[in-house]
Image (spheres, grey):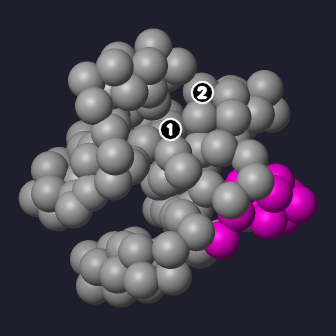
């Protein structure tokens, strides 16, 4: 079974969604982006096809942490990277304790982001 390489981005800032989409696609990843947690949760195909989620903490409506908790209920060990423009160490530890791969502050360190993505995909493909 081939693991999907689709990365789902959830951020209410259009510029962030667009920048991450362009960046990830330039590296060969398929992406799908959503403005809100609710939009993603209504799209069953996006949920089941996602190989990784990049989720902003501060969304309109349901928060990114609430979204990640909901993904944990629906999916088995969803790989997620939590991002925020206003994060601190407390938020980092909260994200990690929830089961996220990592927490990254905006502006995102692109090299570190790709390192986390490649490592996660490598680990998951070695389990197949």
Farthest residue toward the top? 97
Q: Is residue 36 left or right of residue 9?
A: right
Q: Residue at x 29, y 79 (%)?
A: 23
Q: Position of residue 48 (x, y in %)?
A: 74, 52
Q: Is residue 38 left or right of residue 91?
A: right
Q: Which residue is mark 2?
A: 77
User: Image height check: is 94 above or below 127?
Assistant: above
In magenta, the rendered stretch is: 35-45
Q: Is residue 65 left or right of residue 122?
A: right
Q: Secondary structure at mark 2?
A: loop
**Residue 41 magenta-highlighted:** yes
User: Image height check: is 46 above or below 104?
Assistant: below
Q: Residue at x 68, y 28 (%)?
A: 69
Q: Secondary structure at mark 1?
A: loop
Q: Which residue is mark 1?
A: 79
* Residue 25 visible from this viewpoint: no
């Amino acid at each position: 079974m081939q693991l999907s390489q689709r990365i789902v981005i959830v951020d209410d800032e259009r510029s962030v969604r667009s920048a991450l989409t362009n960046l990830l696609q330039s590296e060969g990843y398929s992406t799908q982006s959503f403005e809100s947690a609710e939009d993603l949760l209504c799209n069953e195909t996006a949920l089941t096809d996602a190989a990784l989620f990049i989720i902003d903490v501060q969304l309109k409506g349901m928060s990114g942490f609430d979204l990640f908790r909901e993904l944990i209920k629906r999916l088995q060990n969803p790989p997620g990277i939590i991002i925020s423009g206003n994060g601190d160490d407390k938020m980092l530890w909260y994200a990690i304790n929830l089961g996220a791969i990592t927490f990254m502050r905006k502006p995102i360190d692109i090299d570190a982001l790709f390192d986390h993505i490649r490592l996660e995909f490598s680990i998951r493909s070695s389990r197949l």
